[in-house]
Amino acid sequence: GENVEQHPSTLSVQEGDSAVIKCTYSDSASNYFPWYKQELGKRPQLIIDIRSNVGEKKDQRIAVTLNKTAKHFSLHITETQPEDSAVYFCAALKGSQGNLIFGKGTKLSVKP
Amino acid sequence: GAGVSQSPSNKVTEKGKDVELRCDPISGHTALYWYRQSLGQGLEFLIYFQGNSAPDKSGLPSDRFSAERTGGSVSTLTIQRTQQEDSAVYLCASSLGGQGTSPLHFGNGTRLTVT
């Protein structure tokens, strides 16, 4: 079955710096890779996603890259702000089925 | 419209008791997911429904766990003979599509504490 590994588990950056979170997946049939953000005490929310037919997608300060050959994808946040502090989860769609398998999360802290 | 609703929001139970957790998805969402989140841990997949069918039950930790969904809407997750290791936040999510590429809308979760 699908297995998603996420690194690092914690990440601390200065405001204005960039943050990068990396994930690898095991199922070569996976074709959809979303990222969710969970602020303290709140529910996870989708922030960006990428499908297997593209290598990169950007939305303002966040971007996601996908390397299907290597089976890894990354989240990039530029010009980080304190409100970016949260736990970020990557996920991969398990094969041809409809369920998402999540990584263990990365706790990002942005220091003012 | 209303979001995903879960009840109860908190549940404290004694070891060995059975519990039922309820999830009301967003109207019209055909896919429904249950995840478990332990303190500081990730989102552990439990089970996924498409309509009333569960194509993937592979995440259920043991045969003490079961879930059903009726009328393509409400779902209940039942844990029998609860153990302390079952303590966690149980999150439900729903989405529009059956292929998994529609955004998941999460509920606020049920915090289960087994004493």
Image (tube, coloured by chain):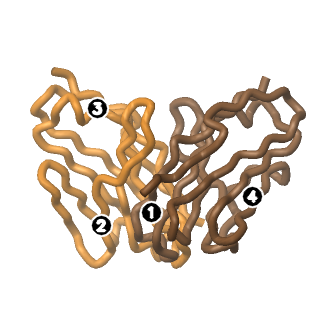
Whether tag 3 and tag 2 are in contact, CB under 8 A, the answer is no
Question: Who's the residue at 28% across and 57% down the image?
Answer: A48
Question: Who's the residue at 52% across and 41% down the image?
Answer: B108
Q: Is residue B82 above or below residue A77?
A: above
Q: Are marks 4 and 3 on the same chain?
A: no
Q: Which residue is mark 2?
A: A50
Q: Nearer the viewer, residue A53 or B35?
A: B35
The picture's colour for chain B is brown
* Label placed on residue A41: none
Calculate the distance from the C-alpha at mark 3 to the C-alpha at mark 2.
Answer: 22 Å
Q: Nearer the viewer, mark 1 or mark 3?
A: 3
Calculate the distance from the C-alpha at mark 4 to the C-alpha at mark 1.
Answer: 23 Å
Three-letter residue code for mark 4: Ala
Q: Relative to B11, is A109 on the left or the right?
A: left
Say which chain tag 1 marks: A
Q: Secondary structure at mark 3?
A: loop
Q: Secondary structure at mark 2?
A: strand
Residue density around tag 1, few if under 14, some if 14–19, many if 20 or more, within 10 Å: many
* Label placed on residue A85: 3
Calculate the distance from the C-alpha at mark 2 to the C-alpha at mark 4.
Answer: 30 Å
Question: Who's the residue at 71% across and 46% down the image?
Answer: B21
Q: Nearer the viewer, mark 4 or mark 1?
A: 4
Residue density around tag 4, few if under 14, some if 14–19, many if 20 or more, within 10 Å: many
Calculate the distance from the C-alpha at mark 2 to the C-alpha at mark 1.
Answer: 10 Å
Q: Which residue is mark 1?
A: A92
Q: Nearer the viewer, residue B36 or B70?
A: B70
Q: Secondary structure at mark 4?
A: strand
Three-letter residue code for mark 2: Ile
Q: Position of residue A53 (x, y in %)?
A: 28, 78
Three-letter residue code for mark 1: Ala
Calculate the distance from the C-alpha at mark 1 to the C-alpha at mark 3.
Answer: 23 Å
Q: Which residue is mark 4?
A: B67
